[in-house]
Image: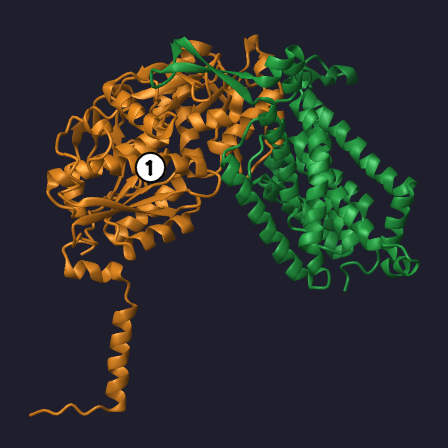
Amino acid sequence: MDAIFLQVLNGLDKGSAYALIALGLTLIFGTLGVVNFAHGALFMLGAFCAVIMRKILTLSHVSLDPEKTNFLGKPLEIRTPYVELWWGDVGTWMIDYSVLIAILFAIPVMGVMGIVMERGLIKHFYHRPHADQILMTFGLAIVLQEIIKAFFGANPIPQSAPDSMSGAMDIGVLFGFAEYAVIYPYWRLVYFVFAAVVIGGVFAFLRFTTFGMIVRAGMADRETVGLLGIDIDRRFTIMFGLAAAVTGVAGVMYTPILPPNYHMGMDFLVLCFVVVVVGGMGSLPGAILAGFMLGMLESFSSMNEVKAIIPGIDQIIIYLVAMIVLLVRPRGLMGKAGMMED
Amino acid sequence: MSVFTPNRRGLIKSGALLGTGLAMPTIFTAGSAAAYTNAPTGSGVTLGFNVPQSGPYADEGADELRAYELAVEHLNGGGDGGMMNTFSSKALSGNGILGNKVNYVTGDTQTKSDAARASAKSMIEKDGAVMITGGSSSGVAIAVQGLCQEAGVIFMAGLTHSNDTTGKDKKANGFRHFFNGYMSAAALAPVLEEMYGPDRNAYHLTADYTWGWTQQESIQAATEAKGWETVNNVLTPLATQDFSSYVAPVLNSGADILVLNHYGGNMINSLTSAVQFGLRDKQVNGKNFEIVVPLYSRLMAKGAGENVKGIFGSTNWHWSLTDAGSQAFVKSFGEKYGFPPSQAAHTVYCQTMLYADAAERAGTFNPCGIAEALEGFDFDGLGNGPTHYRADDHQCFKDVLVVKGKDNPTSDFDLLEVVQVTPRAQVEYAPDHPMFAGGALGKCNPGA
């Protein structure tokens, strides 16, 4: 029973990552009709916002320790971050919480990057076939990841969670399990709560603001909204920026779970496309539902007991479910009628 | 007197013959003009450095390339000579190889077997490389080794740790300086028994490809011989990023040791997950839960950050060694690039020197002459103590290092500490050992 509970937590955790990335992806498809294969790269760029923020906060004053030597026998360099020199404990605290501080950095950076990407490149492909859009955005993703590799190398760069949120908690005790039966990392719980807040925030923004209402109207009937004299293109561009920012912060928060590397976006991209297709292209609730559903299925299928019955099921379960859903309901679980059915 | 009178049939036959001749790769025709593939014709000789310049092991590849460039510089008489000064064989004089200036071409393996074979083929056919070396993956090494055997050039393997490279997939034209899974296990198991005791239950997570399989088989056998039980072995796909689904079942499996048969990004991510799930703070059966990483590299340790502290593993070489060869190499490399070399850099530098030395001693670039010079060769001064290149399988035998993640590193490079130098005798095995069974070395192919 405790193993099942553990996999439920794992499923929620995986699902929250899938849902967050898929939310941005489907937001772009729903508003602009663009199949954005560079979306994984946005997740990766967000993660590297955390890396950059940490590098900024740990920029150091270098002094030499004459009593210690480095590998060449020369005096050892002692590096003290400037923020610690200037602000003492506050500086130390800032470095410790660099992942959370990076969110403040990533939101404007990723938002602007999304808008530049849309205005500079993607808008020229609105009236081109989906195949052209896929080729262009896929090429863009490769360019972005190669740029990151050139600057940061190919190996993962570890990012730690704040001390107060690292380690694991005995969550099982809260639910009546034996002591130490269900241990779960604090940061993964934080990520789940964070994902819920962001997803809720996006839905509330679209549901309860005038801007959101216009965007939803534009998603339903772009032409009519345009005829009313509303500049829907400008709002959709902002939505692209918003989607980029959401995906970026998802990347920032994921760094203590998975040390960022230049390729991480590609690894998530295919999964998240499956999530969007299963949920229904352009459907926000569909993306969330499919994200959590597939995360949960992936988690349970990786249990040794399940794999003993069907070896390798953990590797194919998501694609198997996607095939079944698309065969039975081509528009996806919550897709609009007609979507992907022609 | 015969008169040549062209007709349609004759023209077609001649055209077909000419076309076949032109289409035949130079790889097959070069040998007919010389005694072996790509015999140097001018005053230079070309070596092919086939390393991952893109993909997940690009950093290892970059470090390998640095070491190759340093080796070429030293062979051509530049720099301070590095380990040429400490190498027990004195055949090299800084005058290139056999008086030929050493040139090199590079290829990108992308850590993909097909891409690695394509780049090696191109270097042999188009650039005239007389030797291919490099790689950071056993799958790639085995694929390229096979190609070099067919093409008639020597392959000096880079970072490849699978038993199969000099086991069932060994080839007469291929040579490995790096150690292997069996040796890691033989060196590590006694230390693990001493540190954690004989009564332990191990759970293995294993990368699902040739290296992972042989590494797991080796460490399981070695630890079981010390009294450990193996609770489970779960194969993990190479592309896995988030290992939480694989780590979670360990918690309630009854295991008190987790063995991560992972390398590179896999190891970084699986270790990060294991630490996040609190395994290192856990107690099982009244014992502290421990994690073991059989194959370590400094670059991986850097990626895993603080998570490596106190974790045991093995490595082929480490820059902190104090023997004259290691110190010469670290000084040479460090002064040129500003940081110490990795084990990948060390092994490819050694392989280049060993190839050049063998050519000098054999007095030829003929791969069969070089193979003969390398087979059974005993040497010292290259950083691993007295070393033997065994003729039976072309595997080097030398001391193996057992290392531990350092508790208080002083820099980005100071992440591992050597806890034991395991003597060569402890990691040796018979050429017909069951873990290396199958396949045959075959005969050297000069490509002629």
- Looking at the image, residue B345 sits to the left or right of residue A169; the answer is left
Quarter in which the C terminus of chain B is drawn: bottom left
Q: Relative to the observer, which residue lies in front, B208 or B198? A: B208
Q: Residue furthest left?
A: B1
Q: Could you tell me residue A172's position as x and y percent?
A: 73, 18
- Residue located 35% across and 22% down the image: B318
- Looking at the image, residue A83 sits to the left or right of residue B429; the answer is right
Q: Label 1 crowding class (10 Å Cα cut-off): few <14, some 14-19, many 20+?
A: many
Chain coloured green: A
Q: Relative to the observer, which residue lies in front, A214 or A257? A: A214
Q: Is residue B41 above or below residue B187?
A: below
Question: What amino acid is at disc 1?
Answer: Gly
Q: Could you tell me residue A219's position as x and y percent?
A: 84, 53
Q: Relative to the observer, which residue lies in front, A259 or B250? A: A259
- Residue A158: image quadrant is top right
Q: Could you tell me residue B362's position as x and y percent?
A: 11, 41
The residue where tag 1 is placed is B158
Q: Relative to the observer, which residue lies in front, A103 or B355? A: A103
Quarter in which the N terminus of chain B is drawn: bottom left
- Residue located 44% across and 46% down the image: B112
Q: Is residue A152 above or below residue A61?
A: below
- Residue A223: image quadrant is bottom right
Asked if residue B25 can be seen in this view, the reply is: yes
- Residue located 57% across and 25% down the image: B272
SS under mark 1: loop
- Looking at the image, residue A174 sits to the left or right of residue B42; the answer is right
Chain coloured orange: B
**Mark 1 chain:** B
Asked if residue B392 can be seen in this view, the reply is: no
- Residue located 11% across and 37% down the image: B361
Q: Could you tell me residue B321's position as x and y percent?
A: 31, 18
